[in-house]
Image (cartoon, helix red, strand yellow):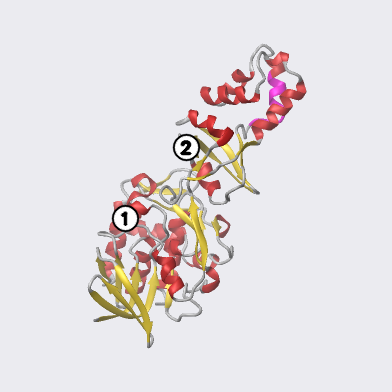
Amino acid sequence: MTTYDAIVLGAGAAGLMCAAIAGQRGRRVLLLDHADQVGKKILISGGGRCNFTNIHTAPDRFLSANPHFAKSALARYTPADFIALVERHGIAYHEKTLGQLFCDGSAKQIVAMLIEECAKAGVDVRTGQPVSDVTHADGKFAVRFGDQYFTAASLVIATGGPSIPKMGATGFAYDLARHFGLKVVEPRPALVPLTLGGDDVLFRELSGIAAPVEARAGKTAFREAALFTHKGLSGPAILQISSYWRHGESVTIDFLPDAPSGWLLDAKRARPRSTLRTALGAALPDRLAETLAERLALPGELAAQTDRKLVEAEAHLKRWTFHPNGTEGFAKAEVTVGGISTANLSSQTMMAKSVPNLYAVGEAVDVTGWLGGYNFQWAWASGHAAGQVI
């Protein structure tokens, strides 16, 4: 049985960062992962180019039962800190949109950088075996990895959430947390496409068509592209809003967020012989314009429509209501909302308040960022916070 100062379970973004930081402090660290290679989710992120952070990171861009929890870690390890690490390794990058930073080359560069940081720190990295038993007695954690046992004074849960199970993701973190008496906020898929049924099924026929919109669920709204799919709705605006949407709620879409109030009445006066479909087609893809016009049921020329009907049509286009019947689930979710309750953890160190030297970081914790590099920044920041103290 080999003894370490700390064992980190899960060699994803948060686990790699945590292990590297602790190792660089002179700690003897063991990093374990059941997958056959480290950083598998990093490799597929950002279309293979890894959207590794967002320069607009702020606590209000994260969901949690405690919206203040993430503030400490995010303040102490910022996007600028991670960018400096990327630049030290000579990795070229660019800003795409909305503060999202991507590698010019490949996500493999980020994984290679983290592996190198761990190697420099003397981290013992082992992969390809299941973690089948974790116990705690006499101030020591014992972990069975394959047919070997390892012990350490500190243990870090960095095994993520159940999103993208084909990459090996499981709910292991939650089972382990409950084993040690920690509460878990019910996990659900986030940054995930929504499915449509009932009267909304017609819109599935628009599969492949995208348009810039404002999507809203409750008081939260996002302005980005929405994409119609053969199952329902996707695209950045929908993925963003999915994190806030709950079963049974509606989602409203403003199909013309830049259109001034009264634009249809103006169109009627400027081009009285044009149709609603033609007016919509000036700003939207043809098939989408046709479908919306059919649903609004205002046939003929604009001149034939009363002002009141045009005002009602404009209002409908501003708050078009969809009633999703579900999501495409963890299989298609980029991340998970919910997880190990922040009420159980120190926001300074990520340590469990009731179990000394047990830590939880990254997606395993009930902190979920917006689309666009925010979840990676939480992984780096929470991993760094724990790595500083284990």
Q: Residue at x 53, y 51 (%)?
A: 243
Query: Which region shows up in magenta?
Result: 259-267
Instruction: Tell me the quarter of the image containing the C terminus.
Output: bottom left
Seen in the picture, residue 125 relative to 286 is either above or below; the reply is below
Instruction: Tell me the quarter of the image containing the N terminus.
Output: bottom left
Answer left or right for 354 relative to 117.
right
- The answer to whether residue 356 shows anywhere in this view is yes
Q: Position of residue 318 (x, y in %)?
A: 66, 34
Q: Amino acid at mark 2?
A: Lys
Residue 257 located within the stretch drawn in magenta = no
Name of the residue lying farthest toward the top = 273
CA separation in Å, label 2 and label 1: 27 Å
In this view, the mark in front (2 or 1): 2
**Which class describes the residues within 10 Å of circle 2: few (<14), some (14-19), or many (20+)?**
some
Q: Amino acid at mark 1?
A: Lys
Kindly check if marks 2 and 1 are in contact, taking CB atoms under 8 A apart as contact: no
Seen in the picture, residue 251 relative to 56 is either above or below; the reply is above
Residue 263 located within the stretch drawn in magenta = yes
The residue identified by callout 1 is 40
Q: Which mark is residue 320?
A: none
Q: Front-most of 138 and 283?
A: 138
Q: Position of residue 36 (x, y in %)?
A: 25, 59
- The answer to whether residue 42 shows anywhere in this view is no
Mark 2 and mark 1 lie on one chain; the one further toward the N terminus is 1
Q: Position of residue 288 (x, y in %)?
A: 54, 26
Seen in the picture, residue 201 relative to 129 is either above or below; the reply is above
Q: Residue at x 53, y 48 (%)?
A: 242
Rendered image quadrant of residue 122:
bottom left
The residue identified by callout 2 is 231
For label 2, the SS is loop
Q: Front-most of 207 and 92?
A: 207
Q: Residue at x 47, y 37 (%)?
A: 231
